[in-house]
Image (cartoon, grey):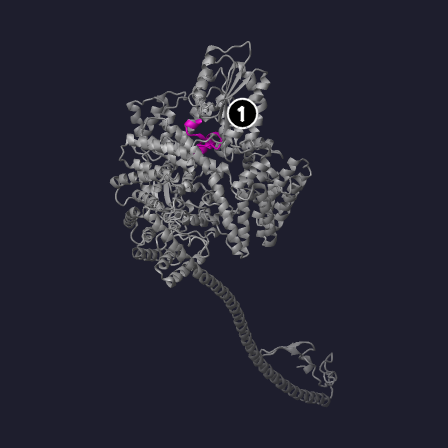
Amino acid sequence: MGTASSLVSPGEVIEDGYGGEGGEACEIPVEVKPKARLLRSSFRRGPRVIGASFKSTGSVDLEYAAEYERLRKEYEIFRVSKNNEISSMQKKEAKLDEENKRLRAELQALQKTYQKILREKESALEAKYQAMERAATFEHDRDKVKRQFKIFRETKEKEIQDLLRAKRDLESKLQQLQAQGIQVYDPNDSDSDDNQTTVTAAGTQCEYWTGGVLGSEPSMGSMMQLQQTFRGPEFAHSLIDIEGPFANVSRDDWDAAVASLLQVSPHVPQALWSNTVRCYLISTQETKAELDIFIKKHSPVLRRLCEGLGHFYLNVCFPEDTAASYAVERKQEIERSSVCVLLVKSTVSSSVVEDCEEAFVKNPDGHPLVLYLRTEEDHNLTGPTRQLLERVNAADKAAKVKVVDHSGSAEDGAYLIYAQLEKVIKQELLGLEGADVDSKDSGIEEGREEDSGDVLWDLHDEQEQIESYQQACSSTNSQLGFQKYIDRLNDMIAAPPPTPPLLVSGGPGSGKSLLLSKWIELQQKQSPNTLFLYHFVGRPLSTSSEPVLIIKRLTVKLLQHFWSISGLSMEPSKILEEFPRWLERLSARHQGNIIIIIDSIDQIQQAERHMKWLIDPLPVNVRVVVSVNVETCPQAWRLWPTLHLDPLSPREVRSVVNAECQTMDLKLAKDQEKKLERHCRSASTCNALYVTLLARMITSSSSCWSLEKSLEQCLQCQDTMSLYRLALKMTLNSLNNDRERHVMREILCLVCASHNGVSESEVQDLFPELELSVLSSLLYCLNRLCIVTLRCGLFRFHHLQAWEAVRLEFLGGGSSSATYREKLIHYFSQQLSHDRVTWRVADELPWLLQQQEDRTKLQLSLLNLFVSQNLYKRGHFSELLAYWQYVGKDKNSMAAEYFDSLKHYEKSCESEDSMTKLANLYETLGRFLKDLGLPSQAVAPLQRSLEIRETALDPDHPSVARSLHQLAGVYVQWKKYGNAEQLYKQALEISENAYGAEHASVARELESLAMLYQKQNKYEQAEKLRKRSVKIRQKTARQKGHMYGFTLLRRRALQLEELTLGKDSADSAKTLNELGVLYYLQNNLDAAKVFLTRSLEMRQRVLGPDHPDCAQSLNNLAALHTERREYETAEDMYERALDIRKRALSPDHPSLAYTLKHLAMLYKRRGKLEKAVPLYELSLEIREKSFGPKHPSVATALVNLAVIYCQLKKHNDALPLYERALKVYEDSLGRSHPRVGETLKNLAVLSYEEGDFENAAELYKRAMEIKEAEPSLVCGNAPSRHSSSGDTFSLRGPAPLPQAPR
């Protein structure tokens, strides 16, 4: 034992056994005597001394025990007291804990109550504000209604009195005229306004509903029931849909015709073959000096001119001594040439005569022709030369040959040839109309950009797709048995909606692309109102397989059918996101179907992720057809309806082989045919590509093998890949020497290693020792063997398997690709300069550097400002962004790099031309940064561009307006609307001063201002500007055509004139009719009458006078005479057409209704109302049979008939027709549809004439409520495609502008 003080040390913590908190130990104040004396004897050292006293020892022990007992009692007292203190403290602590818990619970309850009260307060405030807004709106609406009603009441009372007086006066005048035997009608009514006459008590015409105070807009019922802008669905079932886009004369069909020509245009021969200005030069030994000087000195200038505008330039010349061995190639080159030049002096060779016969005599109108005649006094023309020139002169009936007569030096002669060719290229081939090409950096680019607003897109991508489609359509493989697949495609497309995408599957080379092209071609002829959007995907990693560019191209094609295409975003994610929305918008206003075809969709990079819109439900009039390889089709797509292409049957294999043999004038023996049949039985040897390639290889004229050996070698190949590799070996063996074989390998390897291919001029630059004749022969052979083809001026592989065969045969499976990419990098790097960067350099160089994983050089190439500008201005925004991401730069660092490069470039700019280029670069950078979502950084370059243009050009120059427009767009994105409004107004003022008040640039500024006002909720101001913009676009579209419409019309007319020079036939008569309609649409009525009359006469001779086609010609001539106000002749022709169609067609045929409608309109215009009534009744009967009694078109016919009854004062007969039409409109279109309002207005007119003024006022009030509530079309709300008004809106007026989301 020890003392109490030894149990606890000062500062230690006493643990509480009840879980309470510990406290510090305290020193216990107990006095303890020293125990050293008591214990001295116990701890004494050494043995006990014998003889010591027992008494002394016992007394010590007793003393110790007494002390111990005393201490124990004190300790017990101390312990009890402390335990009592601890227990009391624990009780206090427990009491405090309970109090704390109670207070916490109360606090939580108070917090919940507070939150609840706060939410109630906020909701109450929100409800208060909403109530205040509703109250303000109600007050505004109430005041508006009061004002309208007051104006209506005050004006109507006076107007009624005036009208009653005018009515009595008109009745008296009419009675006087009728007494004199004069029939009254108004010859100023519009042809397309079926019922533009209002109804008065006497049935006369007046303008009290179209003018005065009652209303500023005419009714669409009794006076304008079939107004052009809102024609009903009867147009959708007229002959335009049945007989093609140019079957009928109708001014309203202008836009339909142009839209159809947008589909037909790929078939129209272009001035440039495959984006290349091909100059075919025919010379003799006497003019070789001029030819050499022109090629060495002047043709590089022409090449820079063409390449600066996005085209290739190529001189094609066959040496006179070797021309005889390239007869086939020469003929092909003449057919492809853009311009032919003949250089002649006194003598000519046989090859020169042959080329002149082909180019100048047989087809003098096929392309521009230039004749250079070197004349000298001591040299006379020989007999063959004189005869040749006489034949050329005789063939040149239109005097189109440009003759250059020269007697000076060869250098002067070469310059004259150059000057004439430059003029031809600029004016006739490129359509620059004498424009100064040196200003391309500003003027030409600005003009091209002007056509598409702010949308940037690549015409080369579009031309590549057009040529892909053309080549597939022109294929000779019509013996592949595609008709069964075409029928099944038609059935699947005609299936009721909703329908998922249709999958066309098959093995590689099974003919999927060919089938889709043939099907599109047939559908365009049979369904001209169907809009086709197609895309043919090329090999992987090419531009045509880039998903963002594909969707952007399809979106731009959609937006071509709008009147403004400035709403397209450049951001890749937004492009993919917005395409379904644009598709839905167009489908809602397009009267026909929309079919989207994407070939080889499985070659698209990450197709499932980027083509998610295919899984979403499509609009009811949209169909999607995609083709895939069976092996690479995504699993999720295999559930779609599928059309699988089976291997060719033995009969189809024979037909393909026989067709190729007939082309080459060969015939296979019986045993050879049997060998082929036995060989082509497996799936790999029965596909279309394998059979076609096999047939061309065994019939190849360039092969060094015999027919038997070629067949034997080919039959050893069991698939297309091995057959392609054999074709490559066969072509190599057919060449003359090792140099040509080396060149062939190099060309194919370069094409394989490139991004999009290699052009002919680039091949000549890379192999300057290669003669063009050898190159042309080699490419002809490779093209015939389906190895390479030419698209957009670039050599590409015909099929993906051809690319794979070259990669395996010549590149070791791709291991040697880096070497050829380095060659291309070296070539394109040499072409880099700060003054000129072609689209080819911008397309190829960054991609090649990326494939080589050279980030440093890639960044340097991107910092060449003209490379980035070229990519951006051609719409390759996503590609440019991907390059920077690969380099490892974010948006801000990329912007900083561009700023530094621009500042460095600006130091070297001194001339006006360089300052103009600098301004363009700053503007491009600003637009690029704006599209990146960096408006704060985009302001500085755009402001700098504006400063440069104001200083270098003029403050009122149109380029300044362009800078103001772009800068304002950034401020709009930045939500600084005040700054944007001021800039837009400045740009508008400059554009009006520079171009006039009715230019497309002015319309663009008006649209931008309208969108800005709409964002600020200034709807009235926005609506006024939009209406003005729409009127300008309507007028400019009529002048130059919707998206080059008149150009297409004229080109199509010239093409058709060539087809009418043969003998009389039904096809020639149809072509003449189409020509008449085309000239009518161009306002050339005299020429239209000539062709339509010729068509009628030819049809009467060939088909007989009672054939329905004669009725079509009569109908068109009648419409033409109506346009010229020759009403008697028109009436006679309409009646003859109606008589023929009544006898030849079924009673409910739409063509019959078409003639009935126009004849009834003519009767009404001439005042022959009694004769018009049965026609309108028959038209109503036809529509009821065709569409059913509850169709909006039937309601339109009811209103037409009711109007005639009102004009005949048969109000009792008109009233039930109006009421029935109103019910049909309300049931089918809704109670708030504009047609309902128009019919209510007609009923108001009728009630007014009956004297029921209260009912008339009530009906008119309802009509006005619908009119005011009607959403504005120009604000982006298109009419429903089920609406009778909306079905054909886009065919008359401009398509509604898309409304930007707020």
Report if residue 159 lies within the magenta region: no
Q: Is residue 716 above or below residue 235?
A: above
Residue 615 % position (x, y): 41, 50
Choose between 78 and 159: the one closer to the eye.
159
Q: Is residue 416 left or right of residue 1214?
A: right
Residue 239 % position (x, y): 34, 41
Amino acid residing under circle 1: Leu
The answer to whether one can see residue 541 in this image is no
Q: Residue furthest left?
A: 1143
Choose between 381 and 860: the one closer to the eye.
381
Report if residue 800 lies within the magenta region: yes
Residue 103 % position (x, y): 57, 79
Choose between 1209 and 1297: the one closer to the eye.
1209
Q: Which residues make up the magenta segment?
A: 782-810
Choose between 1215 and 869: the one closer to the eye.
1215
Residue 120 % position (x, y): 52, 72
Q: Is residue 193 left or right of residue 1037?
A: left
* Quadrant into which the N terminus falls: bottom right
Q: Is residue 162 above or below residue 10?
A: above
